[in-house]
Amino acid sequence: MTFASEELDGGITKVILDGRLDIEGAAQIDLRMNVVAGTAKKLLVDMQKVTFLGSMGLRSLVLPAQAVSRRGGKIVLLSPTPLVEEVLRGSNMHLVIPIYQDMAEAIAALA
């Protein structure tokens, strides 16, 4: 699992995940996700290249989402693959972190 981040206009932090978000992948990104979640008020997590999402991967998304929310911020997920989106919806994660397929809609949701 690789992790990259960049700052977008409007104070949005974009995190780009690539790979399998399983036990090993979660271990590789947990610290970086928590650091970003500790400072970002608007967090966009690009999941286009996430090929698998397991329970530890869900945890790697929920904990940062809670941290951002506690500080009055917002977090959204962008373009998960159909398999990953099925896991997100099956676990009701979409009720905690909104899912968008369109970048403009995701950015608008963070405004």
Image: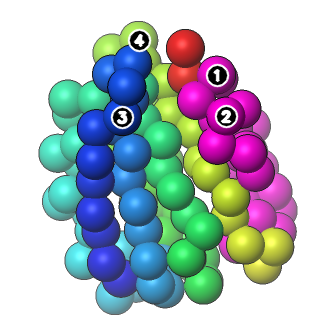
Q: Residues within 10 Å of mark 4 (few under 14, many from 20)?
A: few
Residue carrying label 1: 108
Residue 53 at x, y percent in the picture: 59, 76
Residue 72: mark in rendering = 4
Nearest the viewer among 68 and 47 is 47
Distance of mark 4 from mark 1, alpha carbons? 17 Å
Q: Earlier in the sequence, mark 3 or mark 2?
A: 3
Q: In this view, does 82 lie to the left or right of 1?
A: right
Range drawn in magenta: 84-109
Q: Distance between the residues labelled 3 and 2?
A: 12 Å
The tag earlier along the polypeptide, 3 or 4, is 3
Which residue does the numbered mark 3 point to in the structure image? 8
Mark number for residue 104?
2
Badge 4 or badge 1: first in the primary sequence: 4
Residue type at tag 1: Ala
Residue contact between numbered discs 3 and 2, judged by CB atoms under 8 Å: no
* Tag 4: amino acid: Gly
What residue sits 60% from the left and 48% below the top?
A: 77
Is there CB contact under 8 Å for labels 4 and 1?
A: no
Secondary structure under tag 3 reads strand
Q: At label 3, which amino acid type do we have?
A: Leu
Residue 100 lies in the magenta stretch: yes
